[in-house]
Image (cartoon, rainbow, N blue to C red):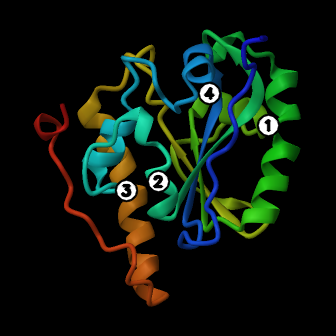
Amino acid sequence: MDAPSDIADLLPGPADPPLSVLFCGVNAPRITVSTGEFFAQPGNRFWRALYGAGFTPRLLASSEYHELARLGYGITKLVGRSTARADELTANELRAGVPRLTDIASREHPRWIAFLGISAFRIAFRRSGAQLGPQSDLRIADARFWVLPNPSGLNRRWSLSALIAEYEKLHIVKAAQNIDHGNAKQPLLPIRTPNQCP
């Protein structure tokens, strides 16, 4: 039996709340594809950053990724080809992934697309001067864009506490929008300090 070469997107089902944030990674590393679990690499800080920033009420294991859909979140990737490192992808591959992301946003209507990785974002969207945070002049199918640091353990420039601080900014904005829209299903969760995020 052939080994899997990709992992399906995590998107909300009929019983889940509307998609408030679609987290978009660059591509699925090989360990993610082989385990069938998002952000499964031992050094990846995605789950700890989400918990620390208040997106999840407890620290989720990668095997519990499906719980995100119940909170109004989804996970996708820009490029379908799996690699050991995201920097193995070519500029053409990154740019070719934008129509796929556009198609997902058109069908699923997320309020925010949180892109994980500023370097890949700059290349894929031809925005060499882009910075982390909201991209006020960019929308895809009415979804707003927010660029976050890549949580990979290979991204050593970012400590866990710094990742949490960046992810928290999006969580605060998202939570304020939930209140404005009368969404009581996604309360503002308390922010955790890094020492509370094992």
Q: Amino acid at mark 3?
A: Lys
Q: Amino acid at mark 1?
A: Arg
Residue carrying label 3: 169
Instruction: Specify which label sits upstream in the sequence, 4 or 3.
Output: 4
**Closer to viewer: mark 3 or mark 2:** 2
Residue carrying label 4: 119
Q: Could you say which quadrant of the image residue 154 lies in?
A: top left
Give neighbour class at mark 1: few <14, some 14-19, many 20+ (Cα, 10 Å).
few
- Residue 146 versus residue 35: which sits nearer the camera? 35
Q: Are marks 1 and 4 in contact (CB under 8 Å)?
A: no
User: Is residue 128 in sight in this rendering?
Assistant: no
Give neighbour class at mark 4: few <14, some 14-19, many 20+ (Cα, 10 Å).
some
Instruction: Specify which label sits upstream in the sequence, 3 or 2.
Output: 2
**Closer to viewer: mark 1 or mark 3:** 3
**Closer to viewer: mark 1 or mark 2:** 2
Compute the Cα span from label 3 to label 2: 19 Å
Rendered-image quadrant of the N terminus: top right
Compute the Cα span from label 4 to label 3: 20 Å
User: Under tag 3, what secondary structure?
Assistant: helix
Residue carrying label 2: 68
- Residue 111 versus residue 95: which sits nearer the camera? 111
Instruction: Specify which label sits upstream in the sequence, 1 or 4.
Output: 4
- Residue 148 versus residue 58: which sits nearer the camera? 58
Which percent across, then down, holds residue 148?
A: 49, 42
In the figure, is residue 49 to the left or right of 1? left
Which percent across, then down, holds residue 55?
A: 36, 56
